[in-house]
Amino acid sequence: MRIVFLKTAGHRAFSCCPPSNQDSAMKHRPLLLSLAALMSAAVLQAETVKDREGAVRSDRKTMEKNDRWIYNQFPWDEEYAAKSADWYRSSAGRRAAHNILTWQSELGGWPKNVDTAAESKASKVRDWKQSGWNVEHLAKAHFDNNATVGEMRFLARAYHATHHEPCRQALLKGLDHIFEAQYENGGWPQYYPATAYHRYITFNDDVMVNLVNLMGDVAGLERDEVFSPWHSAAEQELGRAADPKEFSFVDQQRRAKAELAFERGIDCILKCQILVNGELTAWCAQHNQVTLKPAKGRAYEHPSLSGGESAGVIRLLMSLNEPSPEIIRAVNAACQWYDQVKLTGIRLVWLKDDNKKDDNKIVKDANAPPLWARFYEIGTNRPIFSDLSGQIKYRLAEIDRERREYYGWYSDWGRSVLADWPKWKEKHGL
């Protein structure tokens, strides 16, 4: 007997069969994959405690070093999306493109929490090391915090404006990395290759939404810009829809792969929507990549219904021009959930604590617009909060000030979703 490793949905699986029966094994691959998935889930369950303990340790280490690195994600929406072709041809635009190229990893992606257009990698890393800042995360090719997707959209604009071949080659390399990173079930991890909770299908920080949206644009799929999740706020304010020819220079083989990746991504999104007492609700910030069930991320990110990330998911589904009955059901159910869990009569206010540090709290205000919590308890719809201790609390004031300051627990995420829901239903005659 020998162990054969089968590539399943993002996790290692095993099949035991004699060497002489390998052809037979491949003939019965569907059965083997089903068995492998079950065994993979068992392995994953055994690793869960270790992963969670490791996540807590990692979070504490990160928080201790919080003043040793700069959080500055790639500002595609805020700055570069609305730039003209003339700007991309200018010396400033060409310099920004050059800087982005220097940051691309060997895998094909880019690091997170870095404005890679602002300065070349060699220059920035040298400064960081001299200051003692942590640069370990730069080796990974991330998808969260708008990493990789933002750089690729920039390079597409830059290539259209300048026809600078290195921009095209870098974008194609990035696409190939995204194709490789997608699980067979259509989901993507936080980065690839990933370990611990990072390997979960990641809705947190709009990873799934941004990647599916990018795949649709690369494939040239037409969608309704009125409901599009992030064809950026800057572009929408300028009345600029996404250019369907933006990725027209991508070869047909890759565009076909992008369309398939888009379809698989949408299918994964539908399968991940959480069913509670027979009713569809919303999505978790991360889902197990084998079982698709809600999963725990960092110490303070518990399996829950996300009032934050689910909004982008809904708008992505709304943007599809010919929604299937499954998509219509998913959107209506999720919007109904947002309406049910909106929080009224309260306001989030920022203040300074006794040590002059930023803090926030919830106060009563009958005239305040609705708010939504970042996380809701599955089954009760009660807002939940947590900090590095990993304990679930039901009041924001009960968690550490550090997590109150550095994490978004309340916002108006559901406002635009509920405002556009009637328009979306009217468009499709619902």
Image (tube, rainbow, N blue to C red):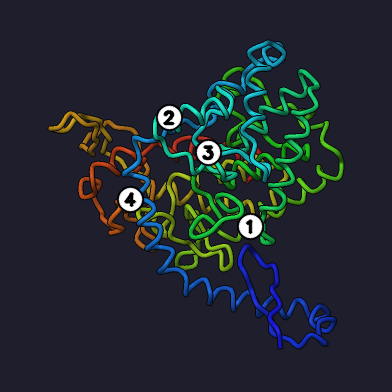
Q: Which comes before the other along the chain, label 1 or label 3?
A: 3
Describe residue 108's horizontal placement relative to residue 333 as left or right. Answer: right
Q: Quadrant of residue 22?
A: bottom right
For the residues labelled 3 and 4, the Cα–Cα distance comes to 19 Å
Identify the residue under disc 3: 112
Identify the residue under disc 1: 268
Q: Looking at this view, is 320 or 34 the one in front?
A: 34
Instruction: Find numbered disc 1 in the image and state the secondary structure of the residue it sits on.
Output: helix
Identify the residue under disc 4: 60
Identified by mark 2, the residue type is Gln
Q: Quadrant of residue 319?
A: top right
Q: Which mark is residue 130?
A: 2
Callout 4: few (<14), some (14-19), or many (20+) C-alpha neighbours within 10 Å? some
Instruction: Find numbered disc 3 in the image and state the secondary structure of the residue it sits on.
Output: loop
Question: Picture coordinates of residue 14 (x, y %)?
Answer: 65, 77
Identified by mark 3, the residue type is Lys
